[in-house]
Amino acid sequence: MRKPAAAMAVVATLCLSLSGLAGTGAVRAAELGHVSGWATLGSVTPAAGCWLDASVEVQHGGAALSDVAVGVNLVHGGEIVSADWGMTGGDGIAFLGVDTSWAAPGADAWLDVVVGGEYAGGMPVSVTEAGGCTDNPDMVEIGAQIPIAGASGTMQAWSAAPAVDSGMVDVGVPAYAQQRNLSCEYASLVIAMGAYGVWVSEYEFDHRVGWSENPHWGYRGDISGWWGNTTDYGVYAAALAPALNDFGFWGETFYGAGNPTALTARLDAGTPVLVWLGLWGDTGFYEYAGDGTPYKLVPGRHVVVAHGYDSGGVYFADPATGGKSYYDWSTFMTYWNVMDGMGLAVGPY
């Protein structure tokens, strides 16, 4: 079946050269595997202003798959107008949602379902005058080919249960959940400073960082907006680093694209590192500030705190879930390279 044109914009094409990993140990073997399942939506004929409950169930070989990154994107006119993402639980199901507050009656949209960074299926949605938010549910079968770690069968899109490695390096950071839809950068600073026993509210960074259309200069968009788009977006490392000075911390901005040692050297030194990841693959494009300065925007971008690594991959604290997880090296470098290996090491003066 041919993918809808709108869905093509958010399909993640993941490729990676592993030549730079020799210094960090072997990469876990992986191969593509077919996953299947179902996606449901509370109504395919909702009114404007509805919150639509959605769920995505993922299976491999007839068994439920946990710790798989999944997402739903509501696309209208070629643009993502609402999105949500998460990880499947032990039953292989993730509970998500999208809303229609952007719409007027008569608007048509398409719900993309993304599993492990790959388009897995979708369904049409029509906004109506008198539709309810739960009165016309629908279900669609989904399927995709995504990387599976051969040794354990864990989905590489989010390998949450790595084998114990005696060579593991771990800085040690607290867990913390971001308080707003798009505050992952500020929440990641909270986590990084928490590694040193210092607690600062994420709201303290709002006025210190400020706002700008260019995320290298300030926060772009509405911090309470929907994740995944580039209008309400976030902020990059260069704009965060100066704000740390008020709390007795320094921030070192660096770019380690294709070079895992740029990250591991800082973790070896005992420093937690914020890393910018492109979870939907390299879907980025360039815009220009008023003075002509170019900057890159990447739909599906997220920030986590890398706090450790071993020969198999990277350990990180994720403010989106308030927990900790793990990427194998192949997956991590794929997502990190999308953002040119953007990182921010954080430490006290």
Image: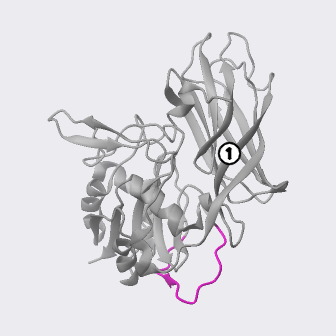
**What residue is rendered at 72% in x and 66% in y?**
153
Using a 10 Å C-alpha cutoff, classify the residue at mark 1 as few (fewer than 14 neighbours), some (14 to 19) or many (20 or more). Answer: many
Residue farthest along the bottom direction in this orientation: 166
Instruction: Say which of 70 and 156 sits in front.
Output: 156
Residue 342 x, y percent position in the rendering:
34, 59
Does the image show residue 202?
no
Q: Secondary structure at mark 1?
A: strand
Q: Quadrant of residue 141?
A: top right
> Which residue is at a point 28% across and 46% down the rendered structure image?
218
Q: Closest to the observer: 5 or 192?
A: 5
164 within the magenta span = yes
**In this orientation, does residue 275 appear?**
yes
Looking at the rendered image, the quarter that the C terminus falls into is bottom left
Q: Residue at the left extreme?
A: 291
Residue linked to disc 1: 144
Q: Amino acid at mark 1?
A: Ala
Q: Nearer the viewer, residue 268 or 12?
A: 12
Please determine whether, in this image, residue 318 is positioned above or below residue 279: below
| 269 relative to 309 in the view: left or right | left
State the image coordinates of residue 258 (x, y, percent, origin top left). 36, 64
Secondary structure mostly seen in magenta is loop
Residue bounds of the magenta highlight: 160-174
Report which quarter residue 264 is drawn in: bottom left
Where residue 114 appears, as percent x and y from the top left, is: 62, 42
Q: Is residue 265 left or right of residue 28?
A: left
Magenta span contains residue 314 = no
Quick one: quadrant of the N terminus? Answer: top right
